[in-house]
Image (cartoon, rainbow, N blue to C red):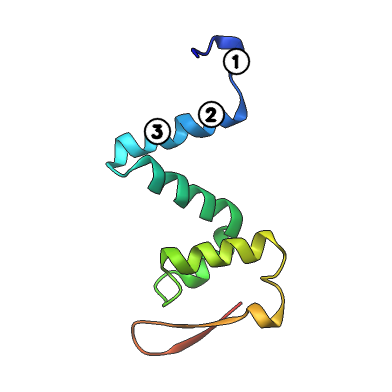
């Protein structure tokens, strides 16, 4: 179904963003969509704490996104310890 000018929705704006970004970066639309979801759910403050640690992996970020969106990330049972490549331990919230 073709979209006319009056058919623009927030969802189609996200689709356009992901498709445009994928085209410009050479990444798949799926990867761009995953990264956008993680960034939206986790937030930049929390993401900045895990960059360069053992938690800076897709699987770990997906788990953190689910924990944040369900409200479990603030509980002590969801605290994780992140290990930096230097071997130092960084307490992560």
Which of the two discs, 2 and 3, labels the residue nearer the N terminus?
2
Q: Residue at x 69, y 82 (%)?
A: 76
Q: Secondary structure at mark 2?
A: helix
Instruction: Give the percent coordinates (x, y) of residue 80.
Output: 56, 81
Q: For label 1, count other residues whose C-alpha is less than 10 Å away and answer few (under 14), some (14-19) or many (20+).
A: few
Which residue was labeled with disc 2? 13
Q: Are marks 2 and 1 in contact (CB under 8 Å)?
A: no
2 or 1: mark nearer the eye: 1
Label placed on residue 7: 1
Q: Is residue 14 above or below residue 89?
A: above
Mark 3 secondary-structure assignment: helix
Q: CA distance from mark 2 to mark 3?
A: 10 Å
The C terminus appears in which quarter of the rendering?
bottom right
What residue sits right under mark 3 in the picture? Answer: 19
Cα–Cα span, label 2 and label 1: 11 Å
Q: Is residue 87 left or right of residue 3?
A: left
Find out whether the residues at labels 3 and 1 contact each other: C-beta distance under 8 Å: no
- Find residue 65 and name its label: none
Sequence-first disc among 2 and 1:
1
Q: Residue at position x 62%, y 80% from top?
A: 79
Q: Earlier in the sequence, mark 3 or mark 1?
A: 1
Looking at the image, residue 23 sits to the left or right of residue 54; the answer is left
How far across and how far down the image is residue 46, in percent? 57, 66
C-alpha separation, residue under disc 3 versus residue under disc 1: 18 Å
Say few, some or many: other residues with alpha carbon within 10 Å of mark 3 (under 14 / 14 to 19 / 20 or more).
some
């Amino acid at each position: 179904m073709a979209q006319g000018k009056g058919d623009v929705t927030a969802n189609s704006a996200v689709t356009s963003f992901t498709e445009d970004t994928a085209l410009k970066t050479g990444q798949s639309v799926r990867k761009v969509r995953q990264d956008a979801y993680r960034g939206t759910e986790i937030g930049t403050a929390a993401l900045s704490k895990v960059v360069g640690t053992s938690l800076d992996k897709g699987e770990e970020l997906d788990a953190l996104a689910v924990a944040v969106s369900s409200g479990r990330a603030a509980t002590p049972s969801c605290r994780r310890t992140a290990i930096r490549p230097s071997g130092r331990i960084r307490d992560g919230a």
